[in-house]
Amino acid sequence: MRSADTEGMRGELLGSSGMSADFVEAKALHSWELSHVERLILTDGTTIIFKCATEPFTHEHEALIGAWQAGVGVPRLIKFFRSGTTLAMLMEDLGEPDQEATDEHGITAAVQLHSAAIPPSLPQADNKWLASLPQRAMRTLDLLNEQGRWSDADDIREALRDIDRAASQRAEGTTTAPYGWVHSEFHPESLLVRDGRVRLYDLARAFHGPCLLDLASWHGTVEAPDPDRTREFLESYVEAGGSASALTRRGGLKPQDWALGWHRVWALEWFLAQALVWIGDVSADHAYMNVVRRHTHDAAYLLNI
C-alpha cells in the first residue's frame, strides 16, 4: 500500500480515538500491496498495532470481534473504521514471540478456534462452494487470456477441467465435522507464542467452512504435499480434543488426501484472483503461473483424478 494512504488512515484513526497527541513513532512490521502493519510507540512507552488493508481484506475487524467474544486468543480490537474499500484498525500489541510456534502450538490453536462459537458475519462455505472452486479458477484463467496473459497455461486449464468434472463427488463431506471457523492463513507465522500463551492473528480471510483446510495448510505449500505428515497432524489434533470426524473419509478419499487436495485447489484459485484482480502485476505472471501449475497438478493427484 502507498505510504501516503497508510499515513492518512493512521492519522484519521488516531485522531478519532483521541490519541494523536500520544503518538511518537511508527515502526513498519509488514507491508505489501494489499495491507500494511505498524507498531506505534506512544508517549508513555506503551505500544499498539496499526493495521490497514484494502479489498478483499476489509472484514477482519468482524472476525476479530467474533473471535474475541468467543474466547479465542486474538489481539483485542481497540478502534476501527471502514471507508470505501479500505479498513484501518488499532489493536492490542501482543509483543514479540519468545519462541517459534511448533506443531503442538498449532494443534492447540486449531482445537480452540475450530470449537469456538461462529459469528453470523463469517461467510459460509459448503459443498457447493468447494465444488465451484475449479470452475471459478477456469473463469479467471479465461479472463487472463482475454488480456493476452497466461497464454502458456493449457496444461493448467486441462487439469482444472478434470478436477471440475469430479468436483461434486470429491467435495462430499465438506460440512462433516470439524466444520466451523477456518482461519485460512493457518501456519506457524500466524501464531504468536509468548509467556506460555498461544495467540492467533491475521484473520482477514476467515470463514465458516471445512476446518481440514486449516490443518492441511499448517505445513505450508512451498514443499510437495506430504499426506503421511498431515495424517500425523490430524491424529494429534484429535488426541488434543479436536473432532474425531477429522479422521473420517470424505469424497471417497482419505481425510489427509482430501484436505491437502482441496487446500491446493483453494490456494490456486486465490493465486489466480490475485493475478487478475487484487494485484494485477503482469511482471509477476510467470511466478504466479508456476505456483498455480504446481498446485493444480498436486490437487489432481491428491484428489485421485
Image: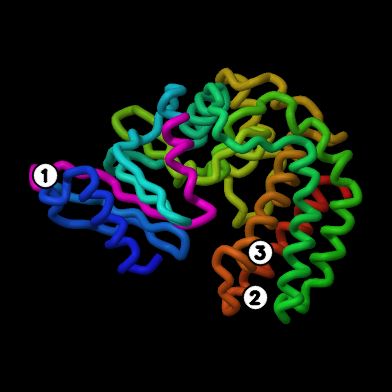
Q: Residues within 10 Å of mark 3 (few under 14, many from 20)?
A: some
Labels 3 and 1 touching (C-beta < 8 A): no
Tell me the residue that label 3 is attached to: 291
Q: Which mark, by number, is residue 286?
A: 2
Horizontal side of residue 109 vs 248, given as left or right:
left
Q: Secondary structure at mark 2?
A: helix
Q: What span is colored magenta in the figure?
A: 43-66
Question: Who's the residue at 56% across and 22% down the image?
Answer: 115
Tell me the residue that label 1 is attached to: 45
Q: Which amino acid type corresponds to the residue marked 2 in the rendered image?
A: His
Query: Is residue 153 highlighted in magenta?
Result: no
Q: Could you say where residue 13 lies in the image, as x and y percent from the top left? A: 27, 50
Residue nearest the viewer, comparing 83 with 66: 83
Give the Cα separation between the discs numbered 3 and 1.
Answer: 43 Å
Question: Residue 282, relative to residue 84: is it above or below?
Answer: below
Question: Who's the residue at 72% across and 61% down the image?
Answer: 294
> Which numbered disc, 3 or 1, marks the residue that appears first in the sequence?
1
Horizontal side of residue 278 vs 291, given as left or right:
left
Q: Which mark, by number, is residue 274?
A: none
Q: Residues within 10 Å of mark 1 (few under 14, many from 20)?
A: few
Question: Residue 187, relative to residue 12: is it above or below?
Answer: above
Quarter assignment of residue 110: top right
Labels 2 and 3 touching (C-beta < 8 A): no
